[in-house]
Amino acid sequence: MEQKIQLTVDAVVFGYDAGDISVLLVKRKYEPFKDAWALPGGFVLEHESLERAVERELSEETGVRINYLEQLYTFGEPGRDPRGRVISIAYFGLVKPNAFKLQAATDAQKAEWFPIKELPKLAFDHKIIFDTALKRLQGKITYEPLGFELLDKKFPFSDLEKLYATLLDREIDRRNFKKKITSLKVLDELNEKVSIGPGRPASLFSFNRKRYFQLKKEGIIFEI
Amino acid sequence: MEQKIQLTVDAVVFGYDAGDISVLLVKRKYEPFKDAWALPGGFVLEHESLERAVERELSEETGVRINYLEQLYTFGEPGRDPRGRVISIAYFGLVKPNAFKLQAATDAQKAEWFPIKELPKLAFDHKIIFDTALKRLQGKITYEPLGFELLDKKFPFSDLEKLYATLLDREIDRRNFKKKITSLKVLDELNEKVSIGPGRPASLFSFNRKRYFQLKKEGIIFEI
DNA sequence: GCAAAAGTGTTCCGCATACACCCATGC
DNA sequence: GCATGGGTGTATGCGGAACACTTTTGC
């Protein structure tokens, strides 16, 4: 069975920083779509696993090393890539954006975070891939806890609240939200406070790792 | 970029009949895994879409034409196929098993339905693919209605109840279940009854197509 | 008349929702 | 002392969960 089919991986990596959800993009160095923005990604090598391929491409093109990656969807319409029949397996990742200094190499001229409401035009069918990933991100929130991968190790409660408000794109009642999260027992309150600017200083919290991953596995029904 | 990577699709097709959930398997005609049972599937042609490839393979190997198919997951571990680097995009399907006469051809010696609790040993990593699909099937039930693709056009309410009980692998309180389904307004009660064997004859119901697909789109939170 | 399956209502409790005021700090 | 953001409690209503008896048929 002779096939002229090629295989790539692409990554939609979301970050959250100061009230903005951003996505990691690279500016392409070569044709096709030279100089256009695209999702980081590239060809799978013959002897590497798909996960390894994504991690390698991400690392090469952006300098980001990621701890949370999951497979999103496989895009294989004939015609989606002008180079021929190219199937792309898309991955979905979460990361703290300020944990890395972006550093482009190989196929990328540069790498940058873009707030998801201010995306440039994307190469290939990457807009479709991005939309699929965003939908997944918004969906995940309803059946498992979210935040560990996106927030700092220690954070004030309002950070988590803002993250959820941003993801759901609506306001959240702070008291009910706190009640819900507290009932999940997924946060540890630390004996520390921060005050940034005016206002009462906030207690710091951290995710209880064990409980967090237990909830992810079990699934929760989260209605805010 | 020279790659020696090949692409296949595989389908996990579930059927429901008389209280049993079954899956469609084919007996392989050629090496590797000659004479072993496997999921229907095969190589993707260069100019066909992935969906078309699954539908074609299913039709060739089993005679089943399917109306509900969704992409499940892509399996790409090096070493999963003795023929070399073969990536498989797995699909997930639902069908009424008695709507088709099974008919094997091309790569399959024969095709058969197997109750999911009595699976034979499967070729390649198909057991893993099957497990993934089963988990998806059980998960779907909690966020969207299910049954339209699996039940006859007209069916007694108890069929739907049995389907859910089987999928969830536990008993269901009939009254609460009826209340829940009724509140969704997804069933139309017909002015017909059937009696099979002893017992009071049952009213027949059918899914309200429009409402059913609307609920699928919106998502429901279904807790029985 | 009895075995088998269909059909039907009520009570209780937990959780989601709505809602407003006081507290600690910086300037 | 005032502006800013952090922190907290109560009342209401809806929906999920538990639970048992009557009805209609075949034999």
Image: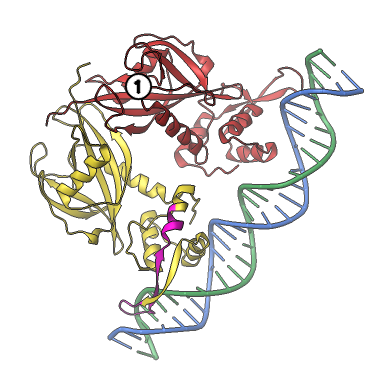
Chain colours: A red, B yellow, C green, D blue
Please indicate whether residue B191 sits to the left or right of residue B82 in the image: right
Q: Where does residue A33 sit, x and y in percent of width and height?
A: 36, 17
The answer to which of B37 and A110 lies nearer the viewer is A110
Residue at 32%, 64% (x, y): give it.
Answer: B152
Taking B107 as reference, is B110 above or below it? Answer: below
- Quadrant of the rendered structure where residue A54 is? top left
The answer to which of B13 and D19 lies nearer the viewer is B13
The amino acid marked with disc number 1 is: Val
Q: Where does residue A58 sit, x and y in percent of width and height?
A: 38, 17
B93 in the magenta segment: no
Q: Where does residue A174 sit, x and y in percent of width and height?
A: 68, 36
Q: Which residue is mark 1?
A: A54
> Taking the image as drawn, is residue B26 in sight?
no
- Quadrant of the rendered structure where residue A81 is? top left
Please indicate whether residue B107 sits to the left or right of residue A40 in the image: left
Please indicate whether residue B86 sits to the left or right of residue B14 in the image: left
Provide the residue span drawn in magenta. Answer: B194-213
Pick the quarter of the image with the N terminus of chain B: top left
